[in-house]
Image (tube, rainbow, N blue to C red):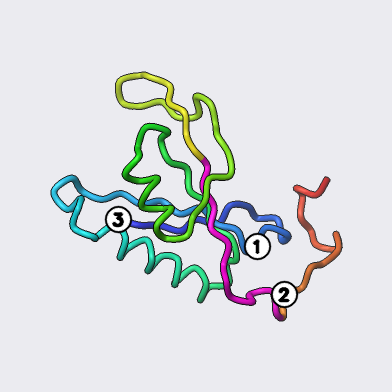
């Protein structure tokens, strides 16, 4: 299962989304994850997203390697952000992929004139 979720309703982040990817254990190691992730990247670019983010459990080296093989890079670390099914707080590695396409053509940056409540 793969999913793309918009990160914020604020217009300046209109092209930023989070990607989630879950592969059933019986399908792991057969290239399914890479095909799915590359397809999510392709679809996100068609939909105008210029940055994809992904949070991966720090010890999930297979997922981290998969994301790296699809052009993601590590940009940060979140401490004790997720609690697993055993009640253990887990750290995540924040990964990001910037689009190689010129997606900003025709994008209107409103300069603060939007109704975005998240402006600082």
Query: Residue at (45%, 66%) from the top-left corner?
Result: 41
Q: Earlier in the sequence, mark 2 or mark 1?
A: 1
Q: Are marks 2 and 1 in contact (CB under 8 Å)?
A: yes
In the depicted view, which residue is nearer to us: 83 or 90?
A: 90
Q: Which residues are magenta?
A: 94-105
Query: Residue at (37%, 32%) from the top-left corner?
Result: 59
Question: Does residue 47 appear to the left or right of 3 in the view shown?
Answer: right
Q: CA distance from mark 1 to mark 3?
A: 23 Å
Q: Earlier in the sequence, mark 1 or mark 3?
A: 3
In the depicted view, which residue is nearer to us: 6 or 31?
A: 31
- Numbered tag placed on residue 107 in the rendering: 2
Q: Are marks 2 and 3 in contact (CB under 8 Å)?
A: no
Check the picture and name the quadrant holding the N terminus: bottom left
- Numbered tag placed on residue 1 in the rendering: 3
Q: Which residue is mark 1?
A: 14
SS class of the residue under badge 2?
loop
Mark 2 burial class by Cα count in 10 Å: few <14, some 14-19, many 20+: few
Q: Are marks 1 and 3 in contact (CB under 8 Å)?
A: no
Task: Give the residue furthest to the top.
Answer: 87
Task: Give the residue furthest to the bottom.
Answer: 106
Q: CA distance from mark 2 to mark 1?
A: 9 Å
Q: Position of residue 28 (x, y in %)?
A: 20, 50
Question: Does residue 102 appear to the left or right of 31 in the view shown?
Answer: right
Where 62 sits versus 1, above or below? above
Q: CA distance from mark 2 to mark 3?
A: 30 Å
Query: Residue at (37%, 61%) from the top-left corner?
Result: 37
Q: Position of residue 82 (x, y in %)?
A: 45, 29
Rendering quarter of residue 42: bottom left
SS class of the residue under badge 1?
loop
């Amino acid at each position: 299962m793969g999913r793309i979720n918009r990160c914020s309703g604020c217009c300046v982040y209109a092209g930023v989304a989070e990607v989630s990817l879950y592969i059933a254990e019986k399908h792991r190691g057969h290239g399914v994850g890479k095909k799915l992730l590359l397809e999510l990247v392709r679809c996100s670019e068609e939909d105008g997203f210029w940055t994809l983010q992904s949070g991966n459990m720090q010890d999930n080296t297979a997922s981290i390697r998969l994301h790296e093989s699809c052009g993601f890079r590590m940009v940060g670390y979140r401490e004790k952000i997720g609690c697993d099914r055993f009640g253990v707080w887990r750290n995540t590695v924040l990964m990001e992929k910037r689009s190689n396409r010129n997606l900003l053509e025709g994008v209107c940056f409103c300069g603060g004139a939007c109704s975005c409540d998240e402006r600082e």
